[in-house]
């Protein structure tokens, strides 16, 4: 495999992984929001901080791995990684986390909210 193709494959895998990592970290924030009631300005502030901090690894991938060129397939693979995590990994784990939280807190906090 030529070095150029190897670099592009590495770029695609890195894009998928950063998309999955992004959604994993955001799911932790969603669980945190369930456990601690927050006002809307606090939620917005946490989201701004989260997405700003997440821009650093995304910039690193685009700049270092792909020489600063933003390619459409990198962005598509990042979105695909996020969707893959959300639909394939998060949905089954969400049910397990809900059961654990119900047992630990011994109350149904999920009636007031529709989803994690």
Image (spheres, rainbow, N blue to C red):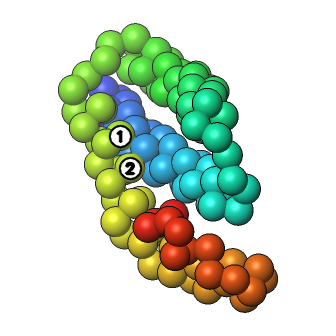
Residue 104 coordinates in the image, percent (x, y): 78, 83
Regarding residue 70, the answer to whether it shows in the image is yes
**Residue underneath mark 2:** 82
- Between the residue at mark 2 and the residue at mark 1, the CA separation in whole angstroms equals 6 Å
Measured along the vertical axis of the image, is residue 76 above or below residue 36? above
| Circle 2 SS class | helix
- Residue at the far left in the pictured view: 72
Q: Are marks 2 and 1 in contact (CB under 8 Å)?
A: yes
**Residue underneath mark 1:** 78
Q: Nearer the viewer, residue 91 or 15?
A: 91
Measured along the vertical axis of the image, is residue 85 above or below residue 81? below
Residue 100 coordinates in the image, percent (x, y): 68, 83
Residue 105 coordinates in the image, percent (x, y): 76, 80
Near mark 1 (Cα within 10 A), the count class, few <14, some 14-19 or many ≥20, is many
In the drawing, does residue 115 fall left or right of residue 107?
Answer: left
Near mark 2 (Cα within 10 A), the count class, few <14, some 14-19 or many ≥20, is many
């Amino acid at each position: 495999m030529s070095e150029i193709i190897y670099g592009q494959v590495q770029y695609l895998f890195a894009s998928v992984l950063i998309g999955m990592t992004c959604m994993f970290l955001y799911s932790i924030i969603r669980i945190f929001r369930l456990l601690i009631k927050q006002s809307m300005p606090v939620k917005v502030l946490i989201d701004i901080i989260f997405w700003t901090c997440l821009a650093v690894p995304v910039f690193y991938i685009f700049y270092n791995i792909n020489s600063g060129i933003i390619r459409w397939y990198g962005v598509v693979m990042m979105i695909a990684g996020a969707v893959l995590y959300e639909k394939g990994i998060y949905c089954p784990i969400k049910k397990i986390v809900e059961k654990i939280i119900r047992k630990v807190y011994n109350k149904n906090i999920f009636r007031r909210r529709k989803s994690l």
